[in-house]
């Protein structure tokens, strides 16, 4: 079998535009409603604790559906699932813009979440089928730039819309963009082989596992309903055990044990979870630290945090290009050392720190994180057979969201336990980044093939699956 060449030009550019436009929309809507949550709660006469489900419904559905939808993409085609996701996301956005009660808004957000899960679960696989093997790192660098840029711009975009329009326009603006992306995608997105049938019972176990775990973590972080949280954790553990036992007997399981048996892939997953935990822990703590300990206002806080995502945006495409020639273990390990140093320096920031002192530390953290993300994603995708691209992409997104959820939860727990939560939190984040760096460098001990071997792996392994 010849080495995969990707899509021809200019179809490759149109496919990329569709993939990244949809990714930007799904990531933006993960944070865009946060800014308007007090206004939404007030206008819909809802308690703040209930209004939080406008956020949680979206996140819970995504986390619970990523792996089943990735498996569905392997079964019926990534393009099909992605296009269905775009339509669902657009319909959910339309529903949000017409919602007249908290229940209606929460249901519409759940529909949005299903659409976003379809988009995120197929993102990595579609990038892999769009670009040739020797340009995959560069493409994933741009992918990381889009994701980090959308996450960073979320609050800014929300504030800009709310300054001139009603909160419902936060969702209404998605409708024409989603329709345009869907129309472009119909003609440009790559086709992929259909390799397996969907394990419906395994998908149900996965949904219960991640859904129960998310609810338990949310309840524990709030410090209430402890018995309910423990019950949810027990349900998650039982579902997880059942899913693992079932996956051991399958060739292409929903929970990708076949991929996790590869040492390089499993270490990439560990690296991703630990790194995103450190990143989210720091991101949650930073506004409180800057405003509380450093006595800066809200506008200054936003500006002082900005160098982090800007540095990620600069570093990610560069790291992606390098990942096509240099081992991901080295690039990720070095980047995470820089991130650990930056976080440690934030923990040691003096009370009277100048603006310059804060800015260069933020930029250092962003630079380190940017050099980790794209190479690690490339490694995860390239170590999987083309026929399992969906499973690898789903695991990639699941690792990211698992780390982000763990980081946010850890921050909430620390606020409950410590008065100096920020300083201790930055130190813990630095330790996590250091451990992630160690996991990445461990791939050099024969667990990760050299970059030149990835193409050979893809030429050999599809024959094993009859493609």
Image (cartoon, grey):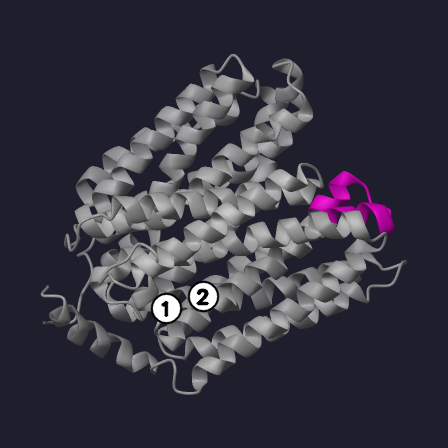
Span colored in magenta? 287-302
Along the line of sight, which residue is nearer the eye, 355 or 87? 87
Q: Position of residue 279 (x, y in %)?
A: 61, 58
Along the line of sight, which residue is nearer the eye, 327 or 255? 255
304 relative to 321 in the view: left or right: right
| Residue 260 numbered mark, or none | 1
Query: Is residue 24 visible in this depiction of the protein?
Result: no
Magenta stretch: dominant secondary structure: helix
The residue at 37%/80% (across/down) is: 448
- Reply above or below: 451 against 226: below
The residue at 26%/44% (across/down) is: 200
Q: Position of residue 146 (x, y in %)?
A: 45, 50
Mark 1 or mark 2: whose residue is earlier in sequence: 1
391 relative to 462 in the view: left or right: right
Quarter that holds the N terminus? bottom left
What residue does disc 2 label?
269
Q: Are marks 1 and 2 in contact (CB under 8 Å)?
A: yes
- Asked if the magenta segment contains residue 123, the reply would be no
Q: Position of residue 219 (x, y in %)?
A: 63, 40
Q: Secondary structure at mark 2?
A: helix
Number of marks in the image?
Answer: 2
440 relative to 342 in the view: left or right: left
The residue at 66%/36% (across/down) is: 225
Query: Is residue 427 visible in this depiction of the protein?
Result: yes
> How many residues crowd mark 2 within 10 Å: few (<14), some (14–19), many (20+)?
many
- Asked if the magenta segment contains residue 293, the reply would be yes
Along the line of sight, which residue is nearer the eye, 413 or 342? 413
Name the residue furthest bottom. 445
């Amino acid at each position: 079998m010849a080495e995969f060449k990707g899509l021809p030009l200019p179809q490759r550019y149109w496919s990329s535009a569709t993939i990244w436009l949809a990714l930007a929309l799904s990531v933006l809507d993960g944070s865009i409603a946060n800014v308007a949550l007090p206004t939404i709660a007030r206008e819909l006469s809802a308690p703040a604790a209930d209004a939080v489900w406008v956020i949680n419904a979206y996140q819970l559905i995504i986390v619970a559906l990523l792996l089943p939808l990735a498996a569905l993409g392997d079964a019926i085609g990534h393009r099909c699932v992605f296009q269905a996701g775009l339509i669902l996301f657009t319909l959910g956005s339309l529903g949000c813009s017409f919602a007249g009660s908290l229940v209606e808004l929460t249901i519409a957000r759940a529909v949005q979440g299903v659409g976003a899960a379809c988009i995120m679960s197929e993102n990595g696989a579609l990038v892999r089928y769009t670009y040739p093997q020797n340009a995959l790192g560069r493409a994933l660098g741009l992918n990381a730039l889009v994701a980090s840029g959308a996450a960073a711009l979320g609050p800014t975009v929300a504030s800009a819309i709310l300054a001139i329009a009603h909160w419902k326009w936060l969702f209404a603006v998605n409708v024409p963009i989603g329709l345009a992306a869907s129309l472009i995608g119909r003609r440009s997105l790559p086709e992929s082989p259909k390799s397996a049938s969907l394990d419906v019972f395994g998908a149900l176990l996965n949904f219960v596992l991640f859904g129960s775990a998310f609810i338990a973590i949310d309840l524990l972080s709030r410090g209430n309903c402890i018995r309910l949280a423990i019950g949810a954790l027990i349900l998650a553990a039982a579902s997880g055990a059942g899913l693992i036992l079932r996956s051991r007997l399958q060739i292409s399981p929903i929970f990708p044990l076949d991929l996790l048996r590869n040492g390089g892939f499993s270490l990439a997953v560990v690296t991703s979870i630990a790194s995103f935990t450190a990143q989210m822990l720091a991101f949650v703590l930073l506004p409180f630290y800057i405003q509380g300990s450093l006595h800066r206002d809200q506008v200054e806080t936003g500006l002082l945090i900005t160098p982090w995502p800007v540095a990620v945006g600069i570093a990610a495409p560069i790291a992606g290009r390098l990942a096509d020639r240099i081992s991901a273990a080295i690039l990720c390990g070095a980047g995470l050392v820089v991130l650990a140093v930056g976080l440690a320096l934030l923990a040691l920031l003096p009370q009277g720190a100048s603006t310059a002192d804060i800015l260069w530390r933020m930029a250092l953290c962003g630079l380190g994180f940017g050099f980790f993300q794209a190479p690690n994603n490339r490694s995860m995708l390239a170590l999987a057979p083309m026929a399992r691209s969906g499973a690898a992409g789903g695991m990639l997104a699941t690792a990211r969201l698992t780390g982000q959820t763990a980081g946010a939860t850890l921050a909430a727990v620390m606020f409950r336990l410590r008065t100096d939560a920020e300083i201790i939190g930055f130190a813990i984040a630095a330790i996590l980044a250091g451990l992630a760096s160690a996991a990445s460098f461990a791939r050099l001990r024969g667990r990760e093939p050299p970059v030149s071997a990835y193409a050979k792996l893809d030429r050999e392994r599809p024959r094993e699956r009859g493609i």
